[in-house]
Amino acid sequence: MARLRIGSRGSQLALWQANHVSDLLRGRGHTVEIEIIKTTGDKITDVALAKVGTKGMFTKEIEEALIENRVDLAVHSLKDLPTELAPDFDIAAITARADPRDAFCSVKFASIEALPHHATVGSSSLRRQAQLKALRPDLQVHTLRGNVDTRLRKLEAGDYDAIILAAAGLNRLGKTELVRQIIPVDVMTPAAGQGALAVEIRNGDSATHELVAFLDDVSARVTTTCERALLSKLGGGCQVPIGALAEMDAGRIRLRAVVAHPEGKKVIRETGVGDDPIRLGREIGEMLLRSGADVILEQVYGEGFAIPQQP
């Protein structure tokens, strides 16, 4: 049996993810240690993620530990991994996917529609802001950073009327008391890869690849590959107003995707069905670009405007 070292961020959710994979590996008889690594995204806590603009802000330092052989594998939320991995790395496994949708959390209000005029909603995601503002242009969307506990405490303290978080993270941590609505995908399309965990290793490390191969879920691999192909076609990372969700439908892949103006002024949605995940992702990406997504994304990349502001 092998001795394996997992690199992970130190947040409660990241450690849940690392321990989840660790438990599965220990179930195969391996000895597993977890090394906590602080990333750029963990160090910068007072600025909206989209304004930081650093690809790999939650993965760079962990990948450095992989290269330096301080860890053997890393466990990430797949949506945090850049769509184009450096040649040094390989996604050896994508685990069975949890609920990919977003959750509306509030102390007082039952849904997005029930929020009063000019209500304050917390989110650091341009993707969420854009789709929220399309539905409710009156809402005030303000920056919300910190781990899940911190965000929920701010909500309970009355800093926000509501916050939007990934359902998967709340479910994993058992913190669903303030979830009032699981937002339909056609209202708020999730981030590419949301709900899936990625096991990253050094490229060419066949021994570790073989040890973690049992973690790879075929459906999760196909659907997230499709979503990430779309994201790559659009040139986007996890902090741009792009949403994508692929699902298996009667043996084929159905992809729903959105690009939205950060202020919700224009929302472009496309849906397609196919058999090849990469081809389908690229095709839907091209359809979005032809429909005007290129103009929206040029504004976001070029001007960095409409970043959620601090309340």
Image (cartoon, rainbow, N blue to C red):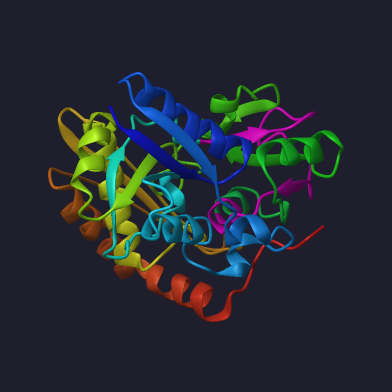
Residue found 16% across the figure and 55% down from its top: 279
Quadrant for the C terminus in the image: bottom right
Closest to the observer, 160 or 148:
148
Q: Position of residue 90 (x, y in %)?
A: 27, 53
Left or right position of 113 against 15: right
Residue 46 visible in the displayed image: yes
Q: Residue furthest right?
A: 157
Closest to the observer, 50 or 30:
30
Closest to the observer, 288 or 20:
20
Residue 43 in the magenta stretch? The answer is: no
Choose top left, top right, bottom left or bottom right for residue 203.
bottom left
Residue found 71% across the figure and 35% down from its top: 149
Above or below 234: residue 212: above
Left or right position of 120 against 99: right
Residue 271 visible in the displayed image: no
Residue 105 in the magenta stretch? The answer is: yes
Q: Position of residue 27 (x, y in %)?
A: 35, 18
Q: Position of residue 213 (x, y in %)?
A: 23, 34
Residue found 37% across the figure and 31% down from its top: 97
Provide the residue span drawn in magenta: 102-130
Choose top left, top right, bottom left or bottom right for residue 295.
bottom left
Closest to the observer, 137 or 230:
230
Above or below 215: residue 283: below
Left or right position of 254 against 162: left
Q: Position of residue 263 (x, y in %)?
A: 61, 63
Quadrant for the N terminus in the image: top left
